[in-house]
Image (cartoon, helix red, strand yellow):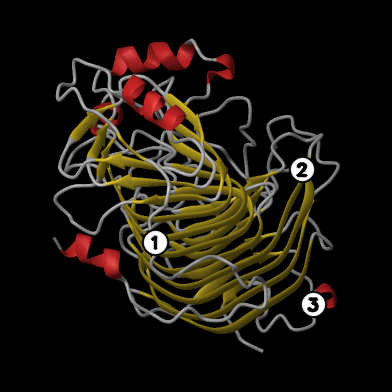
Amino acid sequence: MLALTLLALAGPLAASAAYTPQGRSAELASRAGQTCTIQSSGSNSTDDSPAFRDAAKQCANGGTLLFQEGVDYYFNTPVNATLNTVDIQLKGNIHLPQNVTYVQGIVNGSTGGNVWWINLTGDNLNFTGTTNLSTGWVYGYGQQWWDANPKNGSGIASRPHLWRFNVTNSYISNIKIRKPIAWVTTLNGHDIEVNNVFVDAATTPGGGFPFNTDGFDVAAKNVKINDFTIFNGDDAVTINNGGENVTVTNGFIGGPGCHGTSIGSLGQAQGVYNTVKNIWFENIKVHGCVYGSRIKTYLGGQGIVQNVTFANYDVSNTTFPIYLTQNYFNQGSSQTQNGAGVQEGGNFGGRVDNSSVIIEDVTYKNWKGDINTYQPGDRSCVTDPCWYDVPGSDGTQAIVIGCSNSTACSNFEFQNIQVIPQSYAETKINCTNLEQASNPNLGIVCTNGTLVST
């Protein structure tokens, strides 16, 4: 029950120079229009998705869609709806199918092989759950998918995403998700506010690893995510291509296997220019994760990451608290394997090293906590060496920075980094190509050795 109390994580929302959200943090009034109560069959052998589709059509403009309190709804097929000036009140429970082969068949039959089980588009959408812990859940039944992962596999094929909000001027709150299969929430559009989210994607003792259980994948503009608890096996919140003016505040992230807060990965398609700008992470607690924060770009990628702040992090038992790589290694995909990292000077899997995603104006400030010295990493390795191995690391590195060349990273600042190894050894840094000339206010010495502040 302790984890559930983290739904009420407290802390003031600090003002951000990167983005001042325009969202509505006050309690929302119900719509004045029609209320469409979604009917349930009461059995997982009957599909309730058609009932949702019917209600969504009837109340698509100016109405309210009501999942009744304590009622179970079985979404045996994916749903898509366009809703404008609509409230969705999730007071009941949504269940995804439990038959893995059946779901894989739907994913395989889709165009492009990507399926969001719930796909919502529109303007001025209010999606609200309930703070009642006995109802209002979304059940993904992901554990059986994780347990089915073959030895040395990184997630079985044909997994669906849970849901996507491709919306504008919208509000999402009081969401509770249990055992999602993979990729939980995708945000597209602009002017979106999210509050009070709980995601349980932690595997059972001895169970399979929950690969790709990203909490939020954000490719939207003008976004505020506040007050969240996420236990998972990947990024809790990641900002992808197109993400701009995003604040992420007051979160607890736990593992094992979690990857903290991330930018990217960016630059995988070498001919596509990627952009991420004006991102602010603040008041984040990270426990038992591989990373606290991470910026990841592919060798030979194109694009820019600009104006990013990671402030007020409290990390515990975390392998690499601060991490940046411009030679990202996507485990388990032969198409995107890059081989050895920048720090090794090794081969790069055939990718042409003719460009870099430019990363500039990045600040890390007010970090405290400890490094996972004795049992680093997680149980996700399917390669040898492990995909997250850093040559020369020994469980004492608070900072790992691997810029691809002397001009790829500029205007970095490190302020008040107080993260120590669990062994109480000297705190160290692995740092490549973070040049003083391009980073006049760096605040540390970029070297491979003891962390020295300047």
339 shown above or below 376: above
Nearer to us in this view, 366 or 93: 93
Q: Are marks 2 and 1 in contact (CB under 8 Å)?
A: no
- Splitting the image into 4 quarters, where does residue 301 fall? top right
Query: Which residue is tagged 1?
Result: 29
Disc 2 vs disc 3: which is toward the camera?
2
Q: Which mark is residue 207?
A: none
Amino acid at circle 1: Ala
Contact (CB < 8 A) between labels 3 and 1? no
The residue positioned 32% from the left and 24% from the top of the image is 51
What distance separates the C-alpha of mark 2 from that of mark 1?
46 Å
* Residue tagged 3: 436
Query: Based on the displayed image, in which of its 4 quarters is residue 223 positioned?
Result: bottom right
Q: Give the secondary structure at mark 3.
A: helix
Q: Which is in the foreground here, disc 3 or disc 1?
A: 1
| Among the two numbered marks 2 and 3 on one chain, the one whose residue lies closer to the N terminus | 2
Q: At which x and y percent is residue 371?
A: 39, 69
Along the horizontal axis of the image, is 122 left or right of 2? right
Nearer the N terminus, badge 3 or badge 1? 1
Amino acid carrying mark 2 in the image: Gly
Where in the figure is residue 419, as x and y percent of width and height? Answer: 44, 78
Q: Which residue is mark 2?
A: 301
- Distance, label 2 to label 3, CA atoms, is 24 Å
Position in image of residue 15 (x %, y %): 57, 81
From this viewpoint, is residue 384 visible? no
Residue beneath the point at 38% across and 80% down: 11
